[in-house]
Image (cartoon, rainbow, N blue to C red):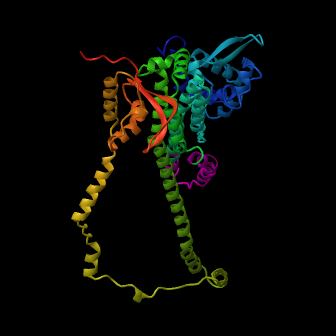
Amino acid sequence: MFFEAERSHFFRPLTGKHREIFVSCLRTLYERINGPSADYSQSLTRDVLREILTPVIQAHLSDTPLDCADESDNFEVDGGDIPQQVSSLIRALQRDGWLEAYGDRAGLVTAYRFTRAGKLFSEALWSLDKLRNKSRQRNVRSCRNALEATLKNRDAYDLIDAYDYAEKVISDLSEGVDYFQELVRRLMSEASQTPWDEFMAFLDNFEKDFKKQLTADNVERHRHAIRDAVNRLHGIEDDAFRALEQKLTDIASWAAQERTGPSTYHWLLERIEDMVEVACNTKNPELIKAMSIYMQRATSIVQQAMMLRSGQTRHAYSRAITKVSALSGQAQTHLLETIGEAIATAEVRLLDPASFKLRTIAQRRRALTVTAQPRITREARLAAALHRAEAGAFALSNEDVLTTLRSGLRLVDRPLRLSSLPCGNATDILQAMQAVEAVRNAPNRNLRATKLPARLTSEFYSGNDYLIEFTYEPIKPD
């Protein structure tokens, strides 16, 4: 479907012998139309288009002149002057689906702009030419702020903003990984030349951007706050939940098609939490590893350059001896006096040969002997077993807690309050403390925990009281 109609030969300008000129022109046009320094005060007429593209073609004219027709480029150039070449290039971009003409009603002129496909691919070419990384990563804080705004205002648009910011968190970290991988590739391809300038530019960029990303904008720093906000949003009042659900159905129809479950609201919250967790557990370590690899490679190359430079200094003595032996008479005396004045402040120390001793055979065998592994005693095994038993004694699975809650709800045939759950032994207390978390993390969402205004205070713990009930009427057995 892509290579039809006006896009039937979309990539033809990038496959001919003049592809470098086309790429340069597309980058310049994107910078002028959609770049950070774009000028929106005037329409992009054909005259303005010629003014933008003429310097680009003149810069490449000495390397690849457009002096003849090329079957792959499909140029129709009769002469070799610049205006005709610019006109031919504009016609080629318009014919192959990169540019399109439209009527500008404000200026009553015919203007040009990128097609949708032309804009997307020109942005990619422009981005490849800009080796930079926007590492501030404000999207982490923006996601957190949007969730807190949802809690405060109960606005569905804030939740949609939080979802969009959470999606961009992973892309920010991925851009950082790609940035360092590109630095490593360039570093290894230019290893013959010491990359002092690029390495110093990275250190300056690290101080300005990456330092902020690893401290104030660190995804790990905001992880717990985002998780806490998501948990509180899961437990909002029923009236607010129904209002948000209805609003999301109207403004986020795409979520109703992608969701897995009956509620768009809960699905968005789960997706936000999952994306932040993936960013923390996967992408953030990848970024740190990529940064570490680049630092190691750059450090090793810089160290090699310094060693080579120091080696050249050591070889200076050999070159001085060679020059002295080649001279004679007054010239040799003058050179020796000059060298003597230069090294007069040097201090020479020699090692005592008696300090060098060869190891005996017994010493070499002792050094190569592998240390025997320590034997594990019975007391150590018993202590490890007790530690594992103590760690597992107070661990309950959410499925066991949900089974107990479902049994209790079916038994009394009405909703249960968290304060009414039994606390006869340690297992009952742990189940009551873990009940709300188990309900919220249930995969089938057939239970619901609603926060109550009353407080729950017992001799074991205190907190908010909750009403636990089925989200639908369960089928009673015959």
Q: Is the magenta stretch mostly helix, strand or loop?
A: helix
Number of numbered discs on residues:
0
Residue 312 belongs to magenta span: no
Question: 139 or 52: which is nearer to us?
Answer: 139
Residue 177, relative to residue 403: is it above or below?
below
Q: In which quarter of the image is the C terminus?
A: top left
Question: 308 or 102: which is nearer to us?
Answer: 102
Q: Farthest residue toward the left?
A: 378
Query: What residue span does the magenta drawing correspond to?
Result: 185-214
Whole-percent x, y for residue 93 in the image: 60, 19
Going by the image, does 366 lie left or right of 2?
left
Figure quadrant of residue 429: top left
Residue 237, relative to residue 204: is it above or below?
above
Whole-percent x, y for residue 91 in the image: 63, 16
Residue found at x 52% / y 32%: 454
Whole-percent x, y for residue 272 in the image: 49, 31
